[in-house]
Amino acid sequence: MSLRIYAIAYLLFLYAPIILLPIFAFNDATIIAFPLSGFTTNWFAELATNKSLHAAVENSLFIAVITALLSTWLGLCAARAGAMHQFPLKAGIMGFIMLPLVLPEIIVAVSLLVVVVQVLELGMSNWTIIAAHVLICTPFCIAILNGAFQNLDPSLEEAAMDLGESRFSAFRLVTLPLVMPGIIASMLIAFTISLDEFIIAFFLSGSSPTMPVYIWGLLRFPASLPVVMALGTILVAMSIILLTIAELLRRRGMARAGVKDKGGFL
Amino acid sequence: MTALITLTGVNKYYADYHALRDINLTINEGEFFSLLGPSGCGKTTLLRTIAGFEMPSDGVVMIGGKDMAGVPANLRPTNMVFQSYAIFPHLTVAENVAFGLRKSKEIDKQTKAKMVAEALAMVGLDGYGKRAAHALSGGQRQRVALARALILKPKVLLLDEPLSALDKKMREQMQVELIRLQRQVGITFILVTHDQEEALVMSDRIAVMFEGEIGQLADPETLYRRPNSRRVAQFIGKMNMLDATVEVVDEVIDLTVRGLGSMQIEREQAPEGGQVGSAVVGIRPETLGILFEGETTERKLVDGVVDEVVYYGDMTYYDVRIEGVEQPLNIAMKNLIGRPVLEVGAKTQVIWDERSLVLLP
Amino acid sequence: MIVSPPFLYALLLMACPLLAIFLFSFWTQDFMTLDTSFTLDNYREIVEKPIYGALLQRSLYVSSCVTFVTVMLAFPVAYFVSFHVRPDRKSLWLFLITIPFWTSYLIRVFLWKVILGYNGVINTGLINVGLIDEPLTFILYNVNAVIITLAHAFAPFAILPIFVALEKIDRSLLEASQDLGESKFMTFLRVTLPLSMPGVVGAVLIVFIPTIGDYVTPELMGGAGGKLVANMIQTQFLALNNAPLGAALAIVAMLCVTVISVIFVLINRRWLKGRS
């Protein structure tokens, strides 16, 4: 019983900042502090007219979509290889691919910065950020897709081939539909990570900032903080919606594959 | 009988592991053939080589007179029932059964539906077509797997340990049904199993495999009564082993068996021919007997002491020590009316007969 | 070979760049011109100037504290979800735990500032209740604030590996232990805890290593005395234009973290044997 109380208190600790977010987003004061002064939707209205914010959001969306597609594709290759094939040094190679999961982000950022600027002598652009985001998102995609592949009986694809399908059509008719929920969940997660990533984007963004880099700039000006709160509220709401979809898909995938649900992401 | 599958000099290596060693095998049309052996003996690899999931490192696999080199599984006239059944969980029962018909464009929809219904009826699953595959029981999955493979009318049906996931009752029921099904459709079945009883019950012929090679290839009765080696004898059923010395090999074989004395046996009791020198004889527990009080026998007797008693209800298994032999003899006795169950330490007489011996090299 | 695309990608975009900054750390830069002759000057400067040593020490201290606090707080939650939540509710709990993690990191850190600040939620709350007269100042713009914020940010990273390890424990082992005469508490100490160690070690590594690379939280929460090595790396690269020194700092920081992690794994290796 006391464990349950502790767990609920812990959840409150986890949610504390997020609960505050909408409170200040609708608060009619420029100072982010209690007591509250009144209800307003001005801050949201201000978001709608901010041109440079729109540009930043557009950038971030572009980066996040490309990152989601690329890292899910890479994750699909790795997860399939991990679940269905045996090859020399398998554990080492899989570990190597998962390594960005524990690599400090600043290391990823500065090492890519050095390569792009000093070695390749290229400028920064959205593509440099995409390159780095794909690197850090792929391990998450692999983790999610591994779940989807591990629930898959390897003889299913063989059975399809035995019944006359080629290797490719066996994958298309059997494996793909069964891991599809995992693929979508993986894309949503990669999208969310990329959209929110700041440490790397700050180093690697070119002349046009991404949304987190833009928010970072706003945080220095007290007057713009309520707008940040409003933006944050929208982002949190969107994240929750996307994650709920990802979770529902993952569960449906589990049910479809006829396995018992054993846990969440990762 | 016409040969359907011939394997000539088939070898399979995985890195430095020799999974199949020079397999030469002919399987006939309409035959119920079993590959029997302990786990890791290569029986599943052999089956997958016939199915086309593994390619032999060297040697030739012919099916229906055609060389199968380079022919992938989807283009071979074989279909498989997988150990896990591999029922597609995202499809219904009918969609599973119809899976292999997708490429047959010349068959129209109604005909396909009719074929599916017939296939389901054949395995006793009429009316199950609309069910979701993941809601089926183990026995039902097995039937779906059978219907899905048989609907394509393959030349050979390959079964990879198909009964191992079922409970004992269900397994016995499915054994009978598989035999019935095989007679009904008349195609060759190749069954992989580690269960010797299952192989004996179902097969026309059995290949017993050890460590990548075929130890003996014979019909069930020969395999049981005349195993050609100690490992086959011990893998199939129980077998008492006694040291022996072969003195003369001629029209008949003269030998001395430790504990039983000198005797003569027929040539056919030595499947490998027999050679002068030391050897081993095998005796099945049910061909020995215990002389109970009031019973008589015309067969030979040897004195012994009961060492262990295991009561099975219909049978009692005794371990009986006889003079000069270290390992007690295992004897199976039917619990007929009036027969007592002997106690450990009881003095008794063992009935034996040299006609039931088999001489092993 | 299907594994090659992700492998080549990691090779090209992780291994090669890491090699590049390693080489880079032996060069020097004067404003914009790069001198590519081999030198140990950068490392010499890091060793000789006390500020780098102090920053590194503080960073390792903060990372260790964050790791300790995060894992200690997370274990009971993972244990609760694994052992006391109905199986069909488990994924809901995990979902609730992971949600805050996926929401904008910058804004979350900023909101901790709102919670812990001079006029923040905690201080106004405590003053209104009457527990304190003056706002507490030890909770913002110092190392404590950094630790609290990071412990919050990395919570799910700690909970999930421990949860997975706990889920893998065969429940009959616990019954066997009680059957052999151990109390529930001793069963926890002698069976559950050792068997969950792979998860705990995983959690420690996955929290400890990345926290060394965070410069957002110390920048926003640390004040003057709470800056960490990642802030210095950032400054060297972006403000001072001394990328080689920044590279050398990054290498040194990573080396420290790796050595500590390896030692930690070696100390715990008896718990990791036979499991993966």
Image (tube, rainbow, N blue to C red):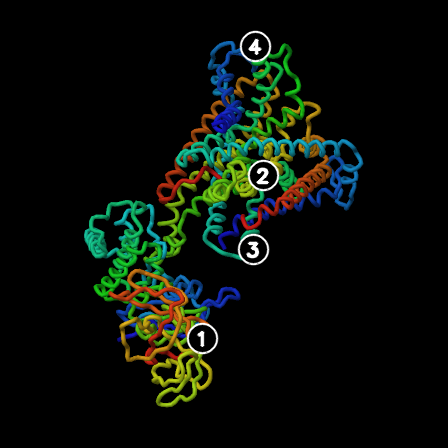
- Taking depth in this image into account, of B47 and A157 the one nearest to the observer is B47
Q: CA distance from mark 1 to mark 2?
A: 65 Å
Mark 4 on the same chain as mark 1: no
Q: In the picture shown, does residue C176 fall above or below A224?
A: below
Which residue is tagged 4? C128
Q: CA distance from mark 2 to mark 3?
A: 23 Å
Could you say which disc has been placed on residue B208 in the image?
none
What amino acid type is highlighted by mark number 4? Answer: Asn
Please state the chain letter of the residue tagged with numbered disc 2 in the rendered image: C
Which residue is tagged 3? A89
Please state the chain letter of the residue tagged with numbered disc 1 in the rendered image: B
Q: CA distance from mark 4 to mark 1?
A: 95 Å
The answer to which quarter of the image holds residue B63 is bottom left
- Give whichever of discs 2 and 4 has the lower sequence position: 4
What amino acid type is highlighted by mark number 3? Answer: Leu
- Taking depth in this image into account, of C112 and A38 the one nearest to the observer is C112
Mark 1 on the same chain as mark 3: no
Drawn side of residue B182 relative to residue C178, left or right: left
Which residue is tagged 1? B325
Drawn side of residue C103 relative to residue C235, left or right: left
Where in the figure is residue C82, as x and y percent of width and height?
A: 47, 36
Mark in the foreground, 2 or 4: 4
Residue at 72% from the left image edge and 42% from the top image edge: C25
In this view of the protein, can residue B41 be seen by the observer? yes
Q: In the picture shown, does residue C6 fall above or below B78?
A: above
Which residue is tagged 2? C206
Circle 3 — which element?
A: loop
In this view of the protein, can residue A127 be seen by the observer? no
Mark in the foreground, 1 or 3: 1
